[in-house]
Each structure stands twice: as structure tokens, then as C-alpha cells.
Image: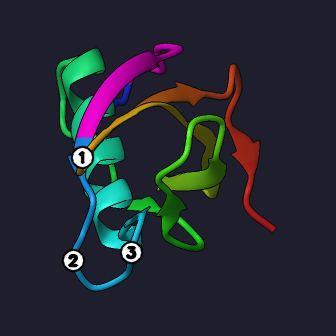
Amino acid sequence: MRSFRLVIASLALVAVVGCGEADVVSRSEVEKQTQAGLTKSVGQEAPPAKCPKSLKAEVGATTRCTMDFPENKRLGITVKVVEVNGDRVQFDIEADQQLTEIE
């Protein structure tokens, strides 16, 4: 089994506001950017991110996402909007310091 070294990540990512809903980054785009950011941070493929909803394109808006790992472990991730410039939204992702058990 390939190990996934946990690195606490705080990354700035940029997404484009979708045209389907005004002033939100779609859930699928938040998930895609979160996975890509953590993959880049640790240097190996991160599991898919799961987020509960779209992210409002307003500074300070947050959502909590998760990634599930082998052996019933889960990583919590906070995604927070830090800048909005037209249709471009910059957000930080920060991984929790520890994996938790999946119940």
C-alpha cells in the first residue's frame, strides 16, 4: 500500500465563479481545486475531496471538506475565500493536523 504523508497545508487557490449560480464557486470546482492543491503540496496524488456545498464568492465565506484515506481515516479541510476579483475567487485550504477515524 502506498503511504500518503500528511503535510499541514495552507494553500492559496484561484477558481472562476460559475455562470450557473451567481456569486458562487461550484461544489465540484471547490473539490477539484482542493484535491489539486493538496496533491501539489505533498507531491503525490491526494484522494478525492468531498465538499457539502458550493462556496459563496465573498471574502470570509468558508466550507468544510473531507478526504477519505485507507484504513478508515478521514482528513478534514477548511476552505476559506480570501479575495474576490470579478469572476475570480481566491481561497485558502487548510488541512486539519490529524486524521480522524471514519465512523
> Label 3, on which residue?
22
Residue beneath the point at 59% across and 72% down: 52
Q: Quadrant of residue 88?
A: top left
* 28 magenta-colored: no
Three-letter amino acid code at disc 3?
Ala
Label 1 and label 3: CA atoms lie apart by 14 Å
User: Residues in magenta?
Assistant: 5-14
Label 1 and label 2: CA atoms lie apart by 12 Å
Task: Name the element at disc 1.
Answer: strand
> Label 1, on which residue?
15
Q: Quadrant of residue 77?
A: top right
Q: Residues within 10 Å of mark 1 (few under 14, many from 20)?
A: some
Three-letter amino acid code at disc 1?
Ala
Q: Is residue 52 above or below residue 31?
A: below
Label 3 and label 2: CA atoms lie apart by 6 Å
Residue beneath the point at 47% across and 17% down: 9
Three-letter amino acid code at disc 2?
Cys
Give coordinates of residue 48: x percent, y percent: 33, 58
